[in-house]
């Protein structure tokens, strides 16, 4: 090595291949410092460093695999060396041709260094395109696309030809990167995808051209997936939706189907709201109008379909058979029936729903700043208690944050409804844009005014989207009482609510409303109002078009009720907190910051901010400042979605009662189990939005599925303040969730194992056991006391000697066969092993295994993290 190192001082006489052997030896010995010095000196000793690097890469294969290699290390060092010797970097066509042969098989981490060193951007463009086409025709579609991106060749290539193979291999991210810097290519790509959304399109017509694709996933090309991809591209690149008429039509058709479900199946929308949204969705689109008529025939009747056909002015040739004949015949009859239905509905609503206790004259609809003065004076008074709610037009999945259309403020015996679009427009005309923001800032920042809301943080975000001057209102708010937090605390403190001395299931509808059996269980604010005031809110106007003026009388009453009920709930909680399981100092404990409304997965998984040192929390804890009351794993029961089976097993190891969905189970089964057994749902991704709407607030939690089970478990335990102790670890069977064990001494286990060899019944059971996966060699938990004076772990178990078992039976009284035949014979020879633990439900056998120390240390991290977290809150 010394000889070769000395030779590197003599420019031009270094043999690249001999030098490579020296470098390989240093690389193998991991002498990185000497390796770096040798490389730096060696480049100076090469007659042509650029050609020398190619010689070494062509005669070595270590750089072809993924990860860090010697070839990658040498290449990067050459790149740094060239910056110090810029005169060296002169690549001719001959070297560039050699580089392209290497690029065809090199890993992604070598692309950028080689392109930079050999100045491939300066090569003849036709030559570069020829190389990309060569890769493409070889079937290396991914490599061809990456090379195009690196060399910025996309404008000279056919975007359809380059992107379709990538889409068929589910490489959507690479496709997005391919068109990212080229708006024209983005538009062409969207138009291609939109043609794939035509009803007559068949992906097989396209995929036949690419039969040799690896990781081919044509099953992913359904209309739903394509629609999501198109809308993601529209939002990411801010493109005109008119480029995608098929996708937009399909989205509107899904909205139509959803509206029909809400109106005719769930029956949770009024006729007025449904009609308004259907008109807005269909518009003048003949294709959608035709589908509307077909849906009406399926869900309603011929006469209703005929009326809509007349309203849309559909030509006769588009009408299904029989609709034209109904246009005139049933018109009067339909009107009479609708009037009767509306009358019956109003009667039912008065019987079963919360009603405003104030006269209609006390509800003020404000559209001018002159009218606002009376609201301003009454609301901005020290000591005032104000109920606040907001309404906006439903987005039905469109891009962007909603803009508030109506702001409701309840104070005393009055409700003010602020027409925000009109007020903001007037303020802009008068060049006094700060009027509204000044009023809101004074209201929310004054700690002497108590503001009541439900999930107020989400409302404030929508208000900030309406008026940009209010973007930091969440941080400035003081004196806020978020009843969403109250609702969550009440549900966490007990699965039952006390009402009039009777216990009522938190998820059950009010039994006094017999005529409401067809409705979904109440949830959110409606459920809270039901339990505190006796009747739920009527939410049928929730999906109204709140931008349309004038507002209907039903909308005005609904909006006023949503704000005024907050005052009544607050008054009743303050008057008698004990009947709701709250501390007597309720008023003081309620005031805090707004709660955090459930958001997208990443926001849900952020760690909550602990309270500042100066803030006291009494009564119940605020979600945004203090943790809920600590509970033990025995008091915490969950159901894990089938995407989180690893988390479920991990939580079982910590003593949590866990039901785990099987792979073939539908996500909706989790909601059914949660309602029946009072469990919290743990899920991830898109199912969260569906599941959390089917159970009570705080009964569904979204977990980051990209994290490992340990981090997921910590996230869940901290969120629900579950305090795990050493006694909880391994207190449940990891396989079946049972928390009752049978303790068997080593001598008795030896007898059972010998007896099982002579019993036919036990032989059958052992055969079943052998066909399963080998059981985990978990610890008998008494071993957790290795570092303690007394045993810490004491599972819920009974010694076998205490049971009345005859002979050598391995069958318990409940029919469970102990899986003793699954124990390797050598385990019984361990002198340090004194007993076994058998699950009394599934018969699984556990004992202290060789990896016990590693397992215990892993759980000790959990215990330490929980202890540190609780200590932090205690100090504050």
Image (cartoon, grey):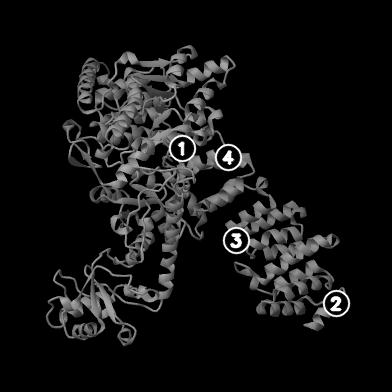
Which-is-in-front pick, marks 1 and 3? 1
Q: Are marks 4 and 1 in contact (CB under 8 Å)?
A: no
Q: Which is more N-terminal, label 1 or label 2? A: 2
Q: Quadrant of residue 705?
A: bottom left
Q: Which is more N-terminal, label 2 or label 3? A: 2
- 10 Å neighbourhood of mark 4: few (<14), some, or many (≥20)? some
Which residue is depicted at the point 29% across and 65% down? Answer: 732
Helix, strand or loop for disc 2: loop
Q: Label 3 belongs to which residue?
A: 138
Q: Which is more N-terminal, label 1 or label 4? A: 4
Provide residue 568's location: percent of width, then percent of height.
30, 28
Q: Is residue 765 left or right of residue 229?
A: left
Disc marking residue 237 = 4
Tell me the distance, in whole angstroms, between the alpha carbons under discs 1 and 3: 33 Å
Disc marking residue 13 = 2
Disc marking residue 247 = 1
């Amino acid at each position: 090595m010394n000889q070769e190192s000395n030779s590197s001082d003599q420019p031009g006489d270094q043999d690249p291949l001999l030098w490579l052997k020296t470098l390989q030896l240093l690389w193998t010995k991991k002498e990185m410092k000497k390796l770096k010095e040798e490389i730096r000196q060696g480049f100076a000793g090469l007659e042509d460093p650029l050609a020398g690097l190619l010689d070494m890469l062509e005669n070595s294969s270590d750089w072809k695999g993924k990860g860090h290699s010697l070839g990658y290390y040498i290449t990067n060092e050459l790149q740094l060396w060239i910056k110090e010797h810029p005169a060296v970097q002169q690549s001719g066509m001959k070297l560039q041709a050699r580089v392209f042969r290497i690029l065809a098989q090199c890993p992604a981490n070598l692309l950028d260094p080689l392109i930079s060193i050999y100045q491939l951007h300066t090569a003849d463009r036709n030559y570069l395109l020829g190389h990309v086409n060569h890769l493409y025709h070889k079937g290396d579609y991914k490599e061809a696309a990456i090379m195009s991106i690196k060399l910025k060749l996309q404008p000279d290539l056919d975007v359809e030809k380059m992107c379709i193979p990538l889409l068929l291999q589910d490489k959507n991210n690479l496709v997005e990167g391919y068109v990212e810097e080229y708006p024209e290519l983005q538009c062409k790509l969207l138009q291609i995808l939109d043609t794939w959304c035509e009803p007559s399109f068949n992906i097989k017509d396209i995929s036949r051209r690419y039969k040799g694709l690896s990781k081919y996933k044509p099953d992913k090309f359904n209309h739903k997936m394509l629609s999501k991809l198109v809308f993601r591209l529209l939002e990411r690149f801010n493109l005109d939706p008119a480029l995608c008429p098929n996708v937009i039509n399909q989205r509107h058709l899904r909205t139509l189907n959803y509206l029909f479900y809400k109106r005719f199946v769930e029956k949770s929308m009024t006729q007025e709201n449904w009609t308004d949204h259907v008109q807005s969705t269909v518009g003048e689109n003949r294709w959608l109008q035709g589908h509307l008529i077909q849906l009406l025939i399926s869900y309603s009747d011929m006469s209703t379909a005929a009326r809509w056909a007349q309203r849309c002015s559909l030509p006769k040739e588009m009408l299904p058979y029989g609709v034209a004949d109904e246009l005139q015949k049933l018109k009067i009859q339909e009107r009479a029936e609708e009037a009767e239905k509306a009358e019956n509905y109003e009667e039912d609503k008065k019987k079963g729903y919360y009603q405003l206790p104030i006269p209609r004259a006390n509800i003020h609809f404000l559209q001018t700043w002159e009218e606002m003065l009376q609201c301003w004076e009454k609301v901005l008074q020290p000591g005032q208690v104000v109920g606040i709610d907001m309404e906006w037009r439903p987005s039905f999945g469109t891009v962007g944050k909603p803009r508030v259309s109506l702001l409701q403020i309840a104070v005393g015996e009055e409700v003010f409804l602020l027409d925000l679009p009109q007020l903001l427009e007037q303020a802009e005309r008068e060049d006094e844009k700060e009027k509204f923001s000044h009023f809101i800032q004074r209201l929310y920042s004054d700690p002497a005014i108590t503001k009541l809301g439900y999930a107020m943080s989400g409302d404030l975000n929508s208000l900030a989207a309406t008026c940009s001057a209010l973007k930091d209102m969440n941080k400035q708010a003081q004196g806020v009482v978020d009843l969403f937090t109250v609702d969550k605390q009440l549900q966490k403190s007990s699965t039952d609510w006390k009402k009039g001395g009777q216990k009522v299931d938190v998820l059950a509808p009010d039994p006094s409303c017999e005529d409401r059996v067809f409705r979904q269980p109440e949830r959110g604010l409606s459920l809270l109002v039901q339990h505190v005031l006796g009747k739920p809110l009527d939410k049928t106007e929730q999906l109204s078009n709140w931008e349309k003026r004038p507002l209907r009388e039903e909308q005005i009453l609904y909006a006023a009720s949503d704000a005024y009920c907050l005052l009544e709930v607050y008054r009743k909680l303050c008057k008698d907190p004990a009947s709701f399981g709250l501390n007597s100092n309720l008023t003081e404990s309620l005031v805090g910051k707004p709660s955090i409304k459930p958001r997208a997965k990443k926001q849900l998984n952020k760690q909550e901010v602990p309270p500042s040192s100066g803030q006291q929390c009494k009564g119940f804890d605020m979600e945004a400042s203090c943790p809920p009351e600590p509970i033990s794993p025995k008091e915490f029961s969950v159901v894990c979605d089938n995407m989180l089976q690893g988390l479920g097993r991990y939580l079982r190891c910590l003593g949590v009662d866990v039901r785990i969905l099987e792979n073939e189970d539908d996500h909706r089964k989790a909601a059914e189990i949660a309602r029946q057994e009072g469990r919290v749902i743990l899920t991830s991704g898109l199912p969260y939005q569906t599941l959390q709407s089917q159970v009570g607030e705080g009964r569904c939690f979204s977990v980051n599925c990209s994290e490992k089970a340990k981090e997921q478990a910590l996230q869940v335990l901290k969120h629900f303040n579950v305090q795990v102790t050493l006694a909880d670890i391994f207190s449940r069977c990891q396989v079946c969730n049972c928390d009752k064990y049978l303790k068997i001494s080593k001598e008795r286990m030896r007898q059972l194992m010998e007896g099982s060899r002579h019993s036919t019944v036990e032989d059958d059971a052992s055969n079943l056991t052998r066909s399963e996966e080998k059981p985990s060699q978990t610890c008998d938990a008494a071993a957790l006391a290795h570092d303690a004076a007394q045993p810490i772990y004491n599972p819920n178990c009974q010694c076998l000697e205490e049971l009345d078992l005859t002979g050598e039976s391995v069958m318990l009284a409940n029919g469970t066969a102990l899986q003793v035949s699954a124990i390797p014979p050598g385990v019984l020879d361990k002198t340090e092993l004194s007993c076994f633990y058998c699950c009394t439900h599934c018969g699984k056998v556990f004992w202290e295994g060789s990896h016990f120390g590693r397992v215990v240390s892993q759980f000790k991290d959990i215990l330490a993290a929980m202890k540190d977290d609780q200590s932090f809150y205690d100090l504050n």
